[in-house]
């Protein structure tokens, strides 16, 4: 998203200019500074950074998610052979899994297949093997599905690699590895090895593990140069997080080179959380004769949100307005968005000085630290989460009833970023909970942005006088 790249560039420049760690908040060692990376103008971003963003976001989602994301949207299935019957299952028993695997599935607390699993699992477990391209948002059960497929296809008496799974980063590979270990906990004959940088094996070794999970570069080396893996013996090939993968040119080519070494009979599976044109083109190149499963993401709307704006002249006034609001109404939990990391740090400091329990998500935190902050906020340990958009992208904190745009979202050209606005304050119809959004306006420029946002959504944003306590109290009703 344009805003994110711009805001991140701003963040990086600010990080180089000054440190904001005046707070007693969870901080960590600094990321390399902008100049050390080769300073970039606002809005510019290297491919690697882009990829890092997507991969970090994906990892963050995995780290903080403990449950399936429910969607009421229907799964769309496009079968390679439209005449073959379409199977879907409502229980794991129907899949006739090996008892050790069924036990593993139940031990993970899964009672029934998720929406995408209902259709994807019968296809993936079919004989003869079927190729599949599957797209659904993060948290809908894709990883669990292909892990179950890999474990089901392994012949444990054969001591060589039979399933190969490529992931975009080392950290994502480790996360998937953990799911394999959990689901296979009653199936100890099946072994797993990580083909990731740093895992150095002696030359001439032939792997005995049946499942290999790794990043494209190392997997390619292990197949081609070092010959630790015989690609001709691979029965299942999984390409996970295709959308993250293609953000790096090299990964796309490496994945295609791996795929070309595999036998025709090998089952090819590709998963992605999003499906823009570039992902689709890549998917079609790498997966021959695919079945296709898509699960639409639920749309967010502003229908159940009360929207207000407050006129101010400076960030100090905006802070004062915020204090007035807090003084007048009870806010269980709020998320406050700032445009830059510097403002976010300043605001978090001011709020904590006022006695609020504040969590700060800041650009220089590592992904695990961000996940820990979000987790604490979700568990109610802190009542206010101050963040920049870069950090908060993709986070669903459903219980948050109040969202405050301390700065309005704009893209790199200074135009309103309507998509981000909707994403910050919108709700999926499914939750239908009422919400409150307060926008802070501090200039003619931001008033103009606000007006354009109103026009875009054709929804009135009411003015709120934060010096009038009675008026503020009314908005809570
Ligand atoms: N059938 C199921 N029943 C209950 N929980 C499930 C089921 N399948 C998966 N889960 C859990 O739901 C969460 C999301 O599943 P999973 O990681 O497989 O989704 P995903 O679509 O791969 O998401 P991502 O793209 O972020 O990896 C995990 O915590 C997983 O353990």
Image (cartoon, helix red, strand yellow):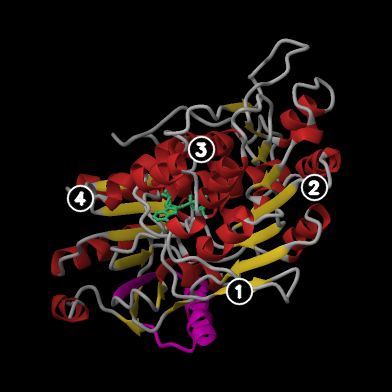
Q: Are marks 1 and 2 in contact (CB under 8 Å)?
A: no
Which residue sits at x=71%, y=64%?
Answer: 291
Q: Name the element at disc 4.
A: loop
The response on whether ligand 1 sits within 8 Å of label 3 is no
- Residue range of the region highlighted in magenta in the rendering: 435-461
The response on whether ligand 1 sits within 8 Å of label 4 is no
Q: Residues within 10 Å of mark 2 (few under 14, many from 20)?
A: some
Numbered label attached to residue 356:
4
Q: Name the element at disc 3.
A: helix
Q: Nearer the viewer, mark 1 or mark 4?
A: 1
Numbered label attached to residue 180:
3
Q: Name the element at disc 2.
A: loop
Disc 2: which residue? 265
Relative depth, front residue between 223 and 111: 111
Q: Report which quarter residue 303 is drawn in.
A: bottom left
Q: Residues within 10 Å of mark 1 (few under 14, many from 20)?
A: some
Q: Is residue 92 visible?
A: no
User: Of label 2 and label 4, which has the lower sequence position?
Assistant: 2
User: Of label 1 and label 3, which has the lower sequence position?
Assistant: 1
Q: Is residue 38 left or right of residue 116?
A: right
Q: Nearer the viewer, mark 3 or mark 4?
A: 3
Disc 1: which residue? 76
Q: Nearer the viewer, mark 2 or mark 3?
A: 2
Relative depth, front residue between 8 and 193: 193
């Amino acid at each position: 998203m344009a805003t994110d790249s711009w805001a991140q560039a701003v963040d990086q420049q600010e990080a180089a200019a000054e440190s904001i760690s005046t707070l007693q908040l969870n901080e960590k060692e600094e990321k390399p500074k902008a100049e050390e990376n080769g300073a970039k103008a606002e809005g510019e971003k290297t491919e690697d950074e882009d990829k890092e963003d997507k991969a970090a976001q994906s990892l963050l989602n995995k780290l903080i998610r403990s449950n399936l994301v429910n969607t009421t949207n229907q799964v769309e299935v496009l079968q390679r052979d439209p005449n073959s019957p379409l199977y879907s299952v409502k229980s794991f028993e129907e899949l006739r899994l090996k008892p050790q695997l069924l036990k593993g599935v139940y031990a993970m607390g899964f009672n029934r297949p998720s929406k995408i699993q209902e259709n994807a699992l019968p296809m993936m477990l079919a004989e003869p093997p079927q190729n599949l391209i599957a797209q659904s948002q993060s948290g809908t059960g894709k990883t669990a599905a292909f892990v179950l497929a890999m474990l089901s296809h392994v012949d444990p008496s054969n001591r060589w690699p039979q399933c190969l799974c490529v992931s975009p980063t080392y950290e994502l590979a480790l996360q998937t590895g953990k799911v394999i270990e959990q689901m296979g906990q009653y199936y100890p004959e099946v072994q797993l090895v990580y083909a990731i940088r740093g895992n150095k094996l002696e030359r001439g070794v032939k792997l005995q593990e049946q499942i290999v999970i790794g990043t494209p570069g190392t997997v390619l080396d292990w197949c081609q140069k070092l010959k630790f893996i015989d690609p001709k013996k691979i029965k299942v090939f999984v390409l996970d997080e295709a959308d993250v993968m293609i953000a790096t040119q090299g990964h796309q080519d490496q994945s295609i080179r791996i795929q070309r070494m595999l036998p025709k009979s090998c089952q090819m599976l590709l998963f992605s959380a999003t499906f823009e044109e570039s992902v689709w083109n890549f998917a079609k190149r790498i997966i021959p004769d695919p079945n296709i499963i898509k699960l639409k993401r639920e749309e967010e709307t502003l229908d159940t949100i009360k929207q207000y704006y407050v006129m101010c002249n400076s960030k100090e006034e905006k802070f004062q307005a915020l204090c007035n609001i807090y003084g007048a109404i009870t806010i269980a939990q709020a998320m406050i968005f700032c445009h830059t990391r510097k403002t976010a740090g300043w605001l978090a400091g001011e709020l904590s000085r006022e006695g609020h329990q504040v969590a700060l998500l800041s650009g220089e935190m590592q992904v695990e630290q961000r996940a820990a902050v979000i987790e604490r906020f979700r568990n109610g340990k802190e009542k206010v989460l101050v963040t920049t958009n870069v950090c908060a992208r993709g986070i669903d904190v459903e219980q948050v009833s109040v969202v405050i745009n301390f700065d309005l979202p704009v893209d790199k050209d200074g135009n309103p970023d309507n998509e981000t606005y909707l994403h910050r304050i919108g709700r999926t119809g499914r939750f239908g909970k009422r919400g409150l959004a307060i926008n802070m306006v501090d200039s003619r420029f931001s008033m103009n942005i606000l007006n354009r946002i109103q026009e875009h959504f054709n929804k009135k944003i009411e003015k709120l006088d934060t010096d009038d306590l009675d008026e503020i109290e009314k908005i809570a009703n």
